[in-house]
Image (tube, helix red, strand yellow):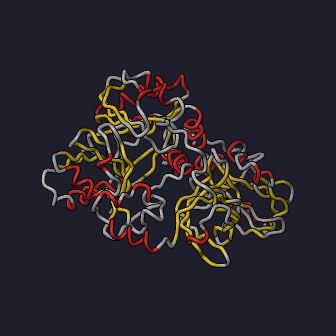
Amino acid sequence: MANIPPELRYTREHEWARREGDRVRIGITDYAQQQLGDVVFVELPGVGARVTSHQSFGVVESVKSVSDLYAPMTGEVVEVNAELKANPALVNRDPYGQGWMILIRPSQPGEWDELLSAQQYETFIAQEGA
Amino acid sequence: MDAPLKRTPLYDLHVKAGARMVAFGGWEMPVQYTGIVEEHRAVRSAAGCFDVSHMGEFEASGPGALEALQYLTTNDVGALDVGQVQYSLLCNPDGGIVDDLTVYRLGPDRFMLTVNAANIAKDWAWVTEHSRRFAGAAWRDISTATALIAVQGPRAEALVGRLTATDLGRLGYYRFAEGTVAGTRAVISRTGYTGEDGFELYVPAEQAASLWTALLETGAGLGAVPVGLGARDTLRLEMRYCLYGNDIDETTNPLEAGLGWVVKPAKGDFIGREAIERVRAAGLRRRLVGLEVLEGVARHGHPVVADGRSIGVVTSGSYAPSVDRAIALAYVESGYATPGTDVGVEVRGRVRPARVVKTPFLPPRVKKG
């Protein structure tokens, strides 16, 4: 069973978003890392880059597959998880903690309310898996 | 409309074990049980059991069988002793590769061919059509009746040894014996697709489930685990073993693929011989080489670039757990094929640094002799 922390928001592309003051931290969900398998490479934008909601901001590669990362919200990247370069397996081990990907300053805070709640995301992956 | 996916006799056991099943070459196969990297490491350090029952087996027998096989395949079947196995190719008249296969000499006039799953129908049509001119060769497609389980890894001999009276210590690499494993009659072949010591066990389809269960139960104490196609691919890639459909196909010739060692023009006429000899005389335009990719992961179809232009294409690429970096096979222009040459791989519109390296990426640890 996939872990879905209730305090986070989610996308249909399996990213999570966590509000931290006026910033939002972003990663991929436990369900996503289970589906991907061993993550071997994560490509992320640099600090200062703009990301746009529903658009790709990076790529995660597992042994067998390549998947785009989609931004849950529009904004500017203020921090990037540099640890993932040397240790991409953190995405598997701790997807909601040490495996985070980027921290952004949203320019359209209203987008937060369009994201899925934990319960909606759980329903979504149950349907996707069925 | 797509034909329904075929299933091996072990399908139910895979699902029960929690394997992730995927479509592969028209078959529904386990890609992984617990994780590709973990399964890969188990094979390199202990042992792994692979269901490769999707592969096809043909039997050719009769006084004309040897002559027919000499004409169909590129390697010299006449050099095979009874009890010996040979890696070989079926080529078309242009020298393109119809399939790669292994040839078993079961008896003086009896042979078995093991072919790729996705090519069974094509190969069957090919071998029966092109051997018509040889009298006294009877063909049988025994693919459905035959299951194939590979046991690979440094503890493979210990594992299979516990289940058979056959003296495995005396069975050399690319040799086979007919015997009994876990009460099932089997062709015990010292071959594989991982670079480790190990066996491929051909058994009647209805016995596959009991053999699989016996191997995993007996193997548990040795660290043996079931291994899916995902790790099968990373294991073979580290050894630079070609995968049909990725690295070789009807548009590639054996010489540029580095498979000239299984082409024996001195044996006499065979399909593709003239074309391959013309390629040999003219020199190779491109070669299949190993790459280490220094950033990101190169995949099948990515362009290889150097000096500001495209000089080749990646045919297989993955993170390689035992090498612990991204590696790839690629056709590159011959001028860039020397180990140590710096090239780039274009991944998602950006050129990543890569280097041509010697292959295999790891030294094989198959049984000597």
Q: Residue at x 66, y 42 (%)?
A: A3
Left or right position of B333 against B354: left
Left or right position of B36 against B137: right
Residue A35: give x, y in percent of width and height: 58, 48
Note whether A41 is above or below B228 in the view shown: below
Residue closer to the observer: B6 or B181 = B181
Note whether A110 is above or below A123 in the view shown: below
Q: Residue at x 33, y 56 (%)?
A: B119
Residue A124 visible (yes or no): no
Residue B4 visible (yes or no): yes
Name the quadrant of the N terminus of chain A: top right
Residue B276: give x, y in percent of width and height: 38, 67
Q: Residue furthest bottom?
A: B308
Residue B336, quarter of the rendered image: bottom right
Residue closer to the observer: B158 or B272 = B272
Left or right position of A23 against B294: right
Residue B332: give x, y in percent of width and height: 56, 69
Task: Give the total of numbered labels.
Answer: 0
